[in-house]
């Protein structure tokens, strides 16, 4: 059997698998490099679409700097779908207080509402967030294309249990968190008018990842891994 067939066929052996339509999905036992992970993810999306029909809602999760946004965009280019970032769902008051690394910074009620609308009506009004003004800047009309039938949500907390339960396919980008993470966090903090040192990132952001993000990635249906130097691993040494 291929890896994608394995993903579907052995699902009955896993008590924590998620079911949609007439299929059940269970995690693949291994993680793959980004190229192989991209191929497997696209094949899995196509298989789920053929089996359960339109729409298929995909979630890609992982820490900042891991490559999940890049993977989501590559996947979207191949499939022809759109990507919705969880950053669009930030609460303005949380960003003003520089707390947007926390799960509570997200408007989960609105996110859940949008996912439900996409599943039932294939469209939703997705929020737009303006980091420079620390506020939500209206909404944009989103509609799943019937031609591709897929939408991808990506973000740090996309695979949190409260979110992933509404998604069809869970993809994690694990490992490979390196200097890009430092640059990304410093960029976000500067964008919000707040500076942060590399030492602060190592002592605050990394523990946040280990406690609140990493545990949710192990249940992903497909795991991909950037093989570059991993600062999280260096912290454990």
Image (cartoon, rainbow, N blue to C red):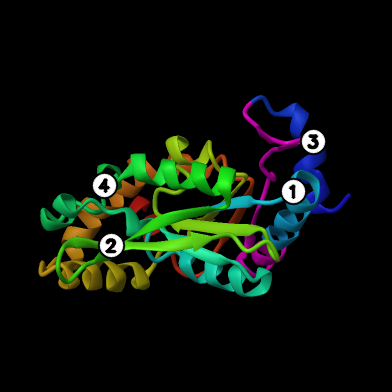
- Work out whether residue 121 or residue 80 is closer to the camera in this orientation and state it: 121
- Work out whether residue 161 or residue 140 is closer to the camera in this orientation and state it: 140
Mark 2: which secondary structure? strand
How far apart marks 3 and 4 lie (CA) works out to 35 Å
How far apart marks 1 and 2 lie (CA) works out to 31 Å
Along the polypeptide, which appears first: circle 3 or circle 4? 3
Mark 1: which secondary structure? loop
Instruction: Write down the residue under mark 3.
Output: 10
Residue 51 is left or right of residue 64, and the answer is right
Residue 107 is left or right of residue 126, and the answer is left
How far apart marks 2 and 3 lie (CA) works out to 44 Å
Tell me if residue 18 comes above or below residue 85 in the rendering.
Answer: above
What is the number of the mark on residue 136? none
Instruction: Write down the residue under mark 2.
Output: 138
Q: Residue furthest top?
A: 15
How far apart marks 1 and 4 lie (CA) works out to 34 Å
Along the polypeptide, which appears first: circle 2 or circle 3? 3
Query: Would residue 33 be counted in the magenta stretch?
Result: yes
Name which quarter of the figure residue 25 lies in.
Answer: top right
Instruction: Write down the residue under mark 1.
Output: 53
Q: Which residues are magenta?
A: 16-39
Task: Determine the residue positioned at 69% across, 44% down.
Answer: 29
Q: Do the residues under discs 3 and 4 have CB atoms within 8 angstroms?
A: no
Instruction: Write down the residue under mark 4.
Output: 102
Tell me if residue 10 comes above or below residue 4 in the rendering.
Answer: above
Is label 1 or label 2 in front?
2
Is residue 122 visible in this depiction of the protein?
yes
């Amino acid at each position: 059997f291929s890896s994608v067939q394995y993903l579907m066929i052995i699902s009955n052996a896993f008590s924590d698998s998620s079911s949609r339509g007439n299929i059940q999905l269970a995690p693949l036992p291994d993680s793959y490099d980004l190229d192989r992970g991209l191929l497997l993810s696209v094949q899995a999306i196509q298989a789920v679409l053929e089996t359960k029909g339109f729409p298929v809602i995909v979630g890609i999760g992982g820490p900042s700097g891991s490559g999940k946004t890049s993977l989501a965009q590559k996947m979207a280019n191949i499939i022809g779908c759109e990507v919705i970032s969880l950053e669009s769902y930030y609460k303005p008051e949380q960003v003003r207080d520089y707390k947007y690394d926390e799960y509570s910074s997200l408007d989960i009620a609105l996110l859940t509402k949008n996912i439900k609308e996409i599943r039932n009506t294939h469209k939703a009004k997705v929020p737009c967030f303006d980091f420079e003004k620390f506020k939500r800047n209206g909404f944009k009309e989103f509609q799943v294309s019937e031609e591709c039938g897929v939408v991808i949500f990506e973000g740090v907390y996309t695979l949190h249990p409260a979110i992933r339960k509404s998604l069809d396919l869970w993809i994690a980008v694990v490992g490979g968190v390196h200097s890009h993470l430092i640059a990304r966090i410093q960029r976000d903090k500067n964008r919000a008018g707040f500076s942060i040192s590399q030492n602060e990132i190592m002592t605050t952001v990394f523990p946040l990842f280990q406690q609140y993000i990493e545990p949710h990635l192990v249940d992903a249906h497909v795991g991909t891994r950037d093989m570059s130097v991993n600062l999280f691993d260096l912290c454990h040494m």
